[in-house]
Amino acid sequence: MHDRHPWLWAAAMAAYAFLYLPLAIVVAYSFNDSRLNVEWTGFTWHWYQVLLHDKNMLVAAGNSLLIALVSCLISTVLGTMAAIAIHRHDFKLLNFMVMTPVAMPEILLGVSLLLFYIQVLHLTLGMLSVVLAHVVFSTGFVAIAVRAALAALDERIFDAARDLGASPWQSFRHVTCPLILPAMIAGALMAFTLSIDDFVITFFTAGVGVQTLPLHIYSMIKTTVTPEVNAVSTLLMLLTLALIFTAARLAPDTLKGKY
């Protein structure tokens, strides 16, 4: 085994500290017994109790969960259909259309959707506009996950199903769907995670009166940062990590980029 220089270990530890130390501070200060949250004064569960009784926060959390659930269901169906079409028929244009929102900067996508809603569709901004926007950028991630699963399958399985007289629907229902189901679930979890965490695109497409959890947290930190913000950020972080961990367990090749 090659010797590793101490400075490489030091550089690696510094990089990890830069990435994860701020998150650890956010979690630690969610238990801080101080309203100003500028110095540590003691341990308390008070801010989690305040969070559970904050009606505005609970409404925003409910909106985020509803938007994330609806958008992830729609994007899972569309992403799976797109992945199968791209894999079987090599549609270059469809591949471009599905993957473009994934690579596009969020602020550009948010502004584009805002102008499209107002100038083309004449759509009133609200929950519907947010759901549609989240479907746009989530579909590509589902398609990536399902394409990874399809690429790993033996095509002779589908040929055998057709030789045995299975119709296209029967082949999909009894052969394709069970084999790609873990990737579909992983894609749905990624879509749910991206939706519930999204701020930039939601900011442009939510309109007046629609509050999601990221938008509500942003409005709170503009005035003062209390440990309640740390508490809700900690819970949101735990939910996100749990969903990412589950997606990685169901479809490990997807997060490694093997597609």
Image: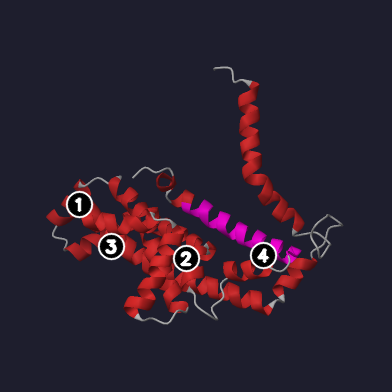
Q: CA distance from mark 2 to mark 1?
A: 30 Å
- Check disc 3 and give the amino acid type: Met
Gap between marks 1 and 4 measured at Cα: 44 Å
Examine the image and state in which quarter residue 137 appears: bottom left
**Magenta region: which residues?**
225-247
Disc 1 on helix, strand or loop? Answer: loop
> In the rendered image, which residue does mark 2 sit on?
201
Return the disc, 4 or 2, that comes first in the chain's sequence. 2
The correct choice, above or below, for 201 with respect to 63 in the image is above
Q: Is residue 197 left or right of residue 103?
A: right
Do the CB atoms of the residues marked 1 and 4 lie less than 8 Å apart? no
Identify which residue, 202 or 47, lies in the foreground.
202
- The structure's colour scheme is secondary structure
Q: Residues within 10 Å of mark 3 (few under 14, many from 20)?
A: some
Circle on res. 81? 3
Whichever of labels 3 and 2 marks the residue nearer the N terminus, that label is 3
Disc 4 vs disc 2: which is toward the camera?
A: 2
Residue furthest toward the top? 2
The span from disc 3 to disc 2 (Cα, nearest Å) is 24 Å
Q: Which numbered disc flags the more N-terminal residue, 2 or 1?
A: 1
Q: In this figure, which residue is indicated by the disc labeled 1?
A: 90
What's the residue at 43%, 65% (across, down)?
A: 110
Q: Quadrant of the C terminus?
A: top left
Q: Nearer the viewer, residue 7 or 110?
A: 110
Residue flagged by tag 1: what amino acid is it?
Asp
Indicate which label's residue lies in the foreground, 3 or 2: 2
Q: Earlier in the sequence, mark 1 or mark 4?
A: 1
Q: Which sits earlier in the primary sequence, circle 1 or circle 3?
A: 3
Instruction: Give the CA separation, mark 4 to mark 2.
Output: 21 Å
The image quarter containing residue 6 is top right
Look at the numbered disc 3 and give the secondary structure of its residue.
Answer: helix
Which residue corresponds to mark 4? 232
